[in-house]
Image (cartoon, rainbow, N blue to C red):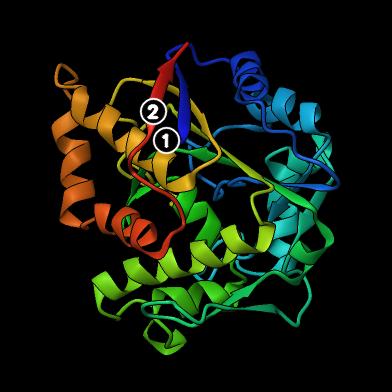
Amino acid sequence: MKPKVYFSREITPEKVAALYKLAGKRLDGKVAVKLHSGEVGNQNFLKPEFWKPIIDEVGGTVVECNTAYKGKRDTTAKHLKTLKLHGWSELFEVDLLDAEGPDLVLDIPDGKVINKNYVGKNIKNYDSLLVLSHFKGHPMGGYGGALKQLSIGIASSYGKAYIHGAGNPKEIWTSDHDSFLKSMADAALSIVRYFKGNALYINVMKNMSVDCDCCAVAEDPCMMDIGILVSCDPVAIDKACLDLVYAAKDDPGQKHFLERVESRNGILTVEAAEALGAGTTDYELIEV
């Protein structure tokens, strides 16, 4: 049976929660809610107020990890300050998964590039995972969605450098590009397996800049807002988002956005994740 991807063109906090209920996937136990806290200075990330209804619905804890690049989120002290500045810790329980070492190491015996994933150790305190992704472009990955959140997002600061460097943290910015993309797929697979199906993915196609929320100086959005997608399959939901971008032929910003995706070979992460068995691109889109 094809995985279902539920899609609504209405973008409101309440609609996010409604689509979660429609998907029919109950997240039991202690729920980790992975989202992007936003680099200080970024104008495009989705704010705490937008995500509040869905986080309240699942009774989840907002989880994040430190970055591997210089900024306002590369140390625990600075990241906690940013989480407060952006309002996350004011509205929700927040857990910086790699606030203190050592990392939790997940084995990926069948990984194509990397065979280990270094993640924030506190992830072991959770029974299920809700991934809230702001779908947009990305300077290195081409695009950012569910698979990036599963890989780079849940990786510790060291783990991020390890993925970017395709197994060699010292080559964080200089590794073979396609190997980096495949490393993201390997890492994403390890998280999919870790939660054993106790996960749900929500992508919101809003404020669609070619730049990521990790950019302190980011381009303004170039595409019109498209909608909200919900699925139990991270590969399917990212592929559905890319398909919707390709279908938006009347959008004047489409060409610019796709140039970012295609010039970075962004689809390779989706294809590699599918080949590993992390999900499928053969999905059923259900518009509601």
Spatial distance from mark 2 to mark 1, Cα to Cα? Answer: 6 Å
In the image shown, does 119 or 239 lie closer to the viewer? Answer: 239
In what element is the residue under mark 1?
A: loop
- Residue 239 % position (x, y): 33, 41
State the residue in front, 43 or 6: 6
Query: Which of the pair 81/148 is nearer the observer?
Result: 148
In the rendered image of this protein, does residue 222 appear above or below residue 36?
Answer: above
Q: Where's residue 198, x and y in %?
A: 69, 48
In the picture of the structure, the residue carrying the numbered disc 2 is 284
Task: Kindly identify which numbered label has been placed on residue 2.
Answer: 1
Dot 2 and dot 1 residues touching (CB under 8 Å): yes
Look at the image and tell me whether residue 266 can be seen: no
Q: Amino acid at mark 1?
A: Lys
Q: Is residue 286 above or below residue 48?
A: above
At 62% from the left edge and 47% from the top edge, which residue is drawn? 37
Instruction: Give the left or right position of residue 74, taking residue 255 as reference.
Output: right
Question: Residue 169's x, y, as percent?
Answer: 46, 85
Front one among 232 and 268: 232
250 to 77, vertically: above or below: above
- The amino acid sitting under disc 2 is Glu
The answer to whether residue 127 of the structure is visible from this angle is yes
In the image, residue 135 above or below residue 262: above
Q: The N terminus is located in which quarter? A: top left
